[in-house]
Amino acid sequence: MIPYKIIFNTCEDMSYIGKGKVKLVVTSPPYWNLKDYESDNQIGYKENYATYLSRMMQVWEECAKCLHDDGVFIININTKSENKSLKLIPNEFIKQLKTFNWILRDILYWHKSSAIPQVNNFGDHFEYFLIFTKNPSLITNNNQFFDYKMDHIDNYNSWNINKKFGSVGKKYMIHPAVFPVRLIERLILIFSKEDDLIVDPFLGSGTSLIASHNTKRRFVGYELNNEEYKRLIKDRLTEYSVDLSLVDFVDNH
């Protein structure tokens, strides 16, 4: 069986995966009204805020269906300033997940080595990782919380893993928010076990697939049907020595 699958289609329908089969969803959704990914049916660009939240609610519902009762749901997001008004998008997502009986277990703060300059606002040098579970007694892999061999990682809820520990390079900057691989690897190690199924409904440049490969997990990712992103993902997988024959690339599943 091919362990990795990328579906180039909307994640607003993830019925392919089936119910209750996923251990961990880890993703970074598109910000509202920030970037045109030049793909049909993209979420968030040139649509009003209510529509953006409604469509994100649909994605979260699809994720909730495929997650196991002992699964973990991690969303990377930040606030967004628009017309001198701050949109508290993390709060909106927390309220949305609550409707599916997911419990906000923790918030992780990722300190970035660089940030996009803001006009008339303080620049953000951190982003939130919202960590949800359905099972309030869920036991995690606690040894991964205290990784003393990785002296660039803080052992509390503020992590300082930056791109020098997983550089992405200038050639990958068509994607505005590429993660360090080590950041996602550590989340996967904490909240899942080998051979578990990991899902990312907004695959982007492929970081979560690379991290799943490095930690011996199975993986399904969704991304918009965009030729530029297909090339980006394949280039990054090749750079990180992921055998492309292990990846099932599916158009419009």
Image: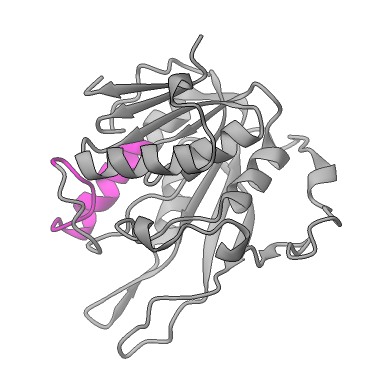
Colouring scheme, one of rainbow, by chain, secondary structure, one colour: one colour
The percent coordinates of residue 100 (x first, y second) are 47, 35
Q: Report if residue 99 is visible in the image.
A: no
- Boundaries of the magenta span: 40-59
Q: Confirm whether the magenta stretch covers residue 186.
A: no
The image shows residue 248 at horizontal and vertical percentages of: 39, 20
Residue 61 in view:
yes
Q: Residue at x 49, y 45 (%)?
A: 207
Q: Is residue 78 left or right of residue 38?
A: right
Residue at the location (47% across, 57% down)? 168
Q: Quadrant of residue 45?
A: bottom left
**At which x and y percent is residue 184?**
59, 47
Residue at coordinates 39% horizontally, 46% vertically from top-left? 205
Q: Where in the figure is residue 76, as x and y percent of width and height?
A: 49, 54
User: Is 151 placed above or below 213 here?
Assistant: below
Residue 44 part of the magenta segment: yes
Q: Residue furthest bottom?
A: 120
Q: Nearer the viewer, residue 131 or 98?
A: 131
At a point 43% along the width and 50% down the height, the residue shown is 28
